[in-house]
Image (tube, rainbow, N blue to C red):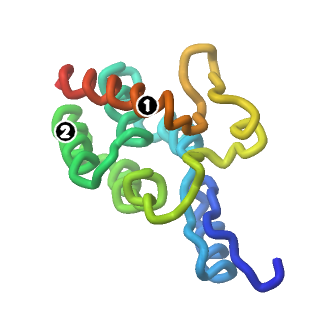
Amino acid sequence: MGGKCPQTIMTDQCAAMAVAISQVFTTSRHRLCIWHIGENSKKHIKTLRNNKNFMDLFNCLLKYTDTEAEFELYWSRMVIDYKCHKNPWLEKLYDCREKWCPTFNKDYFSGGILSSQRSAACHQDSVFDDGCHLKYHVWRPDKDIIRHEEFCAAIVYAL
């Protein structure tokens, strides 16, 4: 790569990849793919995922919080309201929030991409895994700011 490192590298939650990236691409920002986080959540918070209100809040945290204060408020509500403060997977996810939450990555350009599914993400606005659940999303500022405001207003109202 001519001695240059990519600005951002997005992967799943593989610990070996995290170590390799930190050693080989020392100036790159390592981010975690929210699609993979969603897939991993199926194993680690399976019961919680059955609750639509939990999933709305969890997805808001993954994709739509604008500030650190907003993220912390919603995260606190999630762990208190759904009594998941002792879930080891969620604790680890919180500890590495700067790798997956867009709020903590505003200083690095990513084009709004939240998933490592590059080729599909570049060709479609959104893809649904089972016809109902959003798998990943390409940021469209003209449409998504309104969608974000409506989504967060609905979450706040529901809480």
Q: In this rendering, is residue 97 above or below 21? A: above
Q: Nearer the viewer, residue 85 or 65?
A: 65
* Residue 16 showing in the rendered view: no
Q: How crowded is mark 2: few (under 14 residues within 10 Å), some or many (20 or more)?
A: some
Distance of label 1 from label 2 (alpha carbons): 19 Å
Q: Is mark 2 on a helix, strand or loop?
A: helix
As drawn, which residue projects farthest toward the bottom? 3
Q: Residue 46 carries which label?
A: 1
Question: Which residue: 60% across, 37% down?
Answer: 138
Is 27 situated left or right of 105 in this image? right
As drawn, which residue projects farthest toward the front? 142
Q: Nearer the viewer, residue 142 or 116?
A: 142
- Hey, what amino acid is under mark 2? Arg
The image shows residue 31 at horizontal and vertical percentages of 55, 59
Q: In which quarter of the image is residue 62?
A: top left
Is 113 situated left or right of 105 in this image? right
